[in-house]
């Protein structure tokens, strides 16, 4: 059960879907996907906010070329309100950036937990989708950010190291956090169909070695592949959003399709146990 709803059983069942974008290994494309998926969902009429939840190594600001004076850091320290820290991104969505002062928040203290929880709670009624661009791995800050989400999107690339780390992260989510569903996006694929095959292989390994107390294994839901595309690196180098600057390139088209699938497949809160 998500902590947000556990901590507040009276939380309305309406409000934003909170989707954590996470991964086992770093550098697999979480920030690229969070920013561009937000733009694609915004284009579909959704009110979207991306929260830079990679508190220690925030870089959503770099990808979006935004340099706000007020950040989540100021909200956490009580110097500013959430409204003052919310910034409009070029793709028609909102962002809450962590800011460089957040390095001190890379450890999960009780204060960080409370402040994080307060921020998410106040955002839920105001958006249709909250995307949490988390850090990689299974540190307590990452796992806490993921625990606040009603849905998890794990990004992996076809490289064996990325898949081994994705397996390790999903195992922790299933065993310690009782996640029953995990959505998979395979990024930087080379051939069509690669992502589905990889997801099936991961599922087989999980079925064999990971069962939760309920005796059920975690279920992976393959939601899409994003091909390796030189346009992604070009956009990052130019600090531009791929969706708005090169919407016709293969990676942008794949993100559009991902947004469509996510839009059409709301996992009901009963399914995810919240
Ligand atoms: N589909 C892709 N095709 C080509 N390069 C990609 C793709 N996705 C990501 N990249 C490259 O990987 C880099 C790291 O991505 P990023 O989103 O910052 O990873 P993370 O947030 O997981 O650490 C990007 O700057 C980009 O150069
Ligand atoms: Mg990142």
Image: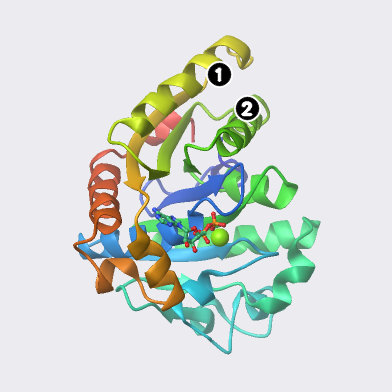
Seen as rendered, the residue at the extreme bottom is 69
Label 1: state its secondary structure: helix
| The N terminus lies in quadrant | top right
Residue 37, image quadrant: bottom left
Query: Where does residue 184 sit, x and y in percent of width and height?
Result: 43, 36
Residues tagged 1 and 2 counted as in contact (Cβ below 8 A): yes
Left or right of 255 on screen, residue 239: right
Query: Where does residue 190 sit, x and y in percent of width and height?
Result: 35, 41
Left or right of 255 on screen, residue 85: right
Label 2 belongs to which residue? 171
Q: Earlier in the sequence, mark 1 or mark 2?
A: 2
Residue 249, image quadrant: bottom left
269 or 185, nearer to the observer = 185
Label 2: state its secondary structure: helix
153 or 144, nearer to the observer = 153
Which residue does the image show at 45% across and 80% down from the upper left? 87
Which residue does the image show at 68% across and 77% down from the upper left? 100
Label 1 belongs to which residue? 206
Which residue does the image show at 32% across and 67% down from the upper left? 242
Seen in the picture, residue 218 relative to 257 is either above or below; the reply is above
């Amino acid at each position: 059960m998500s902590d947000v709803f556990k901590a507040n059983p009276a939380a309305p069942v309406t409000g934003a879907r909170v989707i954590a974008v996470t991964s086992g290994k770093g550098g697999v494309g979480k920030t690229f996907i969070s920013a561009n998926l937000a733009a694609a969902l915004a284009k579909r009429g959704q009110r979207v906010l991306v929260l830079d939840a990679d508190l220690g190594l925030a870089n959503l600001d770099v990808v979006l070329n935004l340099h706000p004076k007020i950040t989540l850091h100021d909200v956490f320290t009580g110097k500013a309100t959430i409204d003052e820290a919310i910034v409009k991104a070029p793709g028609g969505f909102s962002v809450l950036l962590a800011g460089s002062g957040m390095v001190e928040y890379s450890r999960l203290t009780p204060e960080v937990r409370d402040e994080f929880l307060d921020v998410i709670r106040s955002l839920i009624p105001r958006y249709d989708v909250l995307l949490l661009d988390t850090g990689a791995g299974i540190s307590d800050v990452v796992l806490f950010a993921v625990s606040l989400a009603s849905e998890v999107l794990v990004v992996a690339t076809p490289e064996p190291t990325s898949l081994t780390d994705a397996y390790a992260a999903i195992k922790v989510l299933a065993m310690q956090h009782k996640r029953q569903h995990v959505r998979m996006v395979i990024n930087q694929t080379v051939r069509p169909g690669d992502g589905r095959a990889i997801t099936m292989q991961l599922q087989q390994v999980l079925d064999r070695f990971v069962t939760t107390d309920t005796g059920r294994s975690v279920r992976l839901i393959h939601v899409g592949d994003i091909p390796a595309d030189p346009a992604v690196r070009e956009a990052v180098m130019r600090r531009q959003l791929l969706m708005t600057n090169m919407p016709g390139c293969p990676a942008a088209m794949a993100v559009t399709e991902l947004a469509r699938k996510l839009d059409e497949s709301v996992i009901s809160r009963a399914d995810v146990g919240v």
